[in-house]
Amino acid sequence: MTSDHAAASVTSDHAADIDKHVRVYITVFVALMVLTVVTVAISYLDLSVPIAVTVALFVAIVKGSLVAGYFMHLVSEKKLIYAVLAVTVAFFVVLMALPVLTHSNGFWIDE
Amino acid sequence: MDIPYTVEIRRDTGLNNGKIGIWLFLASEVMLFGALFASYILIRVGAPSWPRGDTILDVPLATFNTIVLISSSVTMVMAWASLMRRRFGTFRIYMGATILLGLVFLVVKYFEYGHHLELGEYPRTNNFLAIYYTLTGLHMLHVFGGMMVNAYFWGPGAKLWKTNPVWFTNRVENSGLFWHFVDLVWIFLFPTLYLL
């Protein structure tokens, strides 16, 4: 592909879509700012540790999903990327489960 | 020999090679930070007592840094959008802002670390500080690495725009994916270390 052709495809194929995307980016930015304030505000509520952890992680997951979904374009990505991430998530869950199972004297770890 | 599929889409993957490469790299990064988060959980649930982060760390400063990093993610994605609109001058402004915001994050972290070290709060002091320095230190290295790559695309790497704008745009997109990942990690680090 020559540079002229390449440049043309950059402009003509997506220019209209990009304008739409930019509006979404601004909306997501505002949502992330509001959720940051919510995260800090919740910490002043003096909740018990399990509830505080649950609420804080829930807000963080919402914020993370907005970043991954819109800034990283995961809402409209190819299947292969989803497959890579599905495997990653599976291993990540196992990784997080290990210390929890250790603490609760889980079924395969003896104290 | 030229690197294949930098611009063209591979028929078998439906992606260019750079895109699949950066996502595989990010998958490995998830496991890297995941291992440290798992260590944090293990140390915390095994400790007889654990301090609330806000009794040791500076929450307003970290909140400011959260806003800085989220803002840098927006400027990063706007830099890519500028290239898609073929506005190179605007790209330079947004990319420059991204690099500067990254620098602000590091400067704030420098003062934060300096304050703790002045008080004699070292990684060896206790488990909380050990995991705090490890997680935030590794994250800081990622911010620094991302800034270096972004600075390259802002400066000497931008020559590619003249000869192959699509390849350059793809490169900036991949650099942006890394930068957003760094932001995403901080979104979880902030409440975990500072607020709980």
Image (cartoon, rainbow, N blue to C red):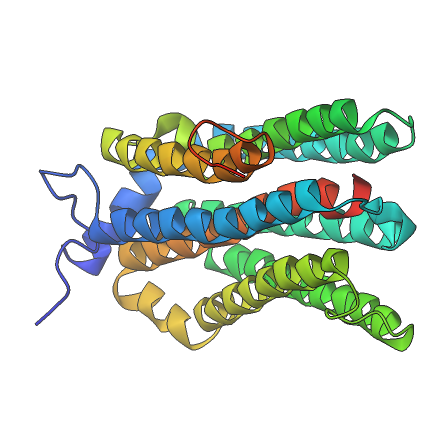
- What's the residue at 71%, 58% (across, down)? B132
Is residue B83 visible to the viewer in this orientation of the structure? no
Is A65 drawn above or below residue B57 in the view shown? above
Instruction: Tell which of B196 and B45 is nearer to you.
Output: B45
Which residue occupies the foreground of this view, B138 or B49? B49
Residue A53 position, x and y percent, is 72, 30
- The reply to whether residue A70 is in sight is yes
In the displayed image of the protein, which residue is found farthest to the front?
A111
Q: Position of residue B90 (x, y in %)?
A: 55, 55
With B33 as the anchor, is A1 left or right in this view?
left
Left or right relative to A12: residue B120? right
Question: Which quadrant of the rendered structure holds the N terminus of chain B?
Answer: bottom left
Q: Quadrant of the C terminus of chain B?
A: top right
| Figure quadrant of residue A111 | top right
Please say if A49 is above or below A5.
above
**Residue B115 against residue A105 in the figure, above or below:** below
Asked if residue B124 is positioned above or below residue A68 in the image, the reply reads: below
The residue at 84%/74% (across/down) is: B117
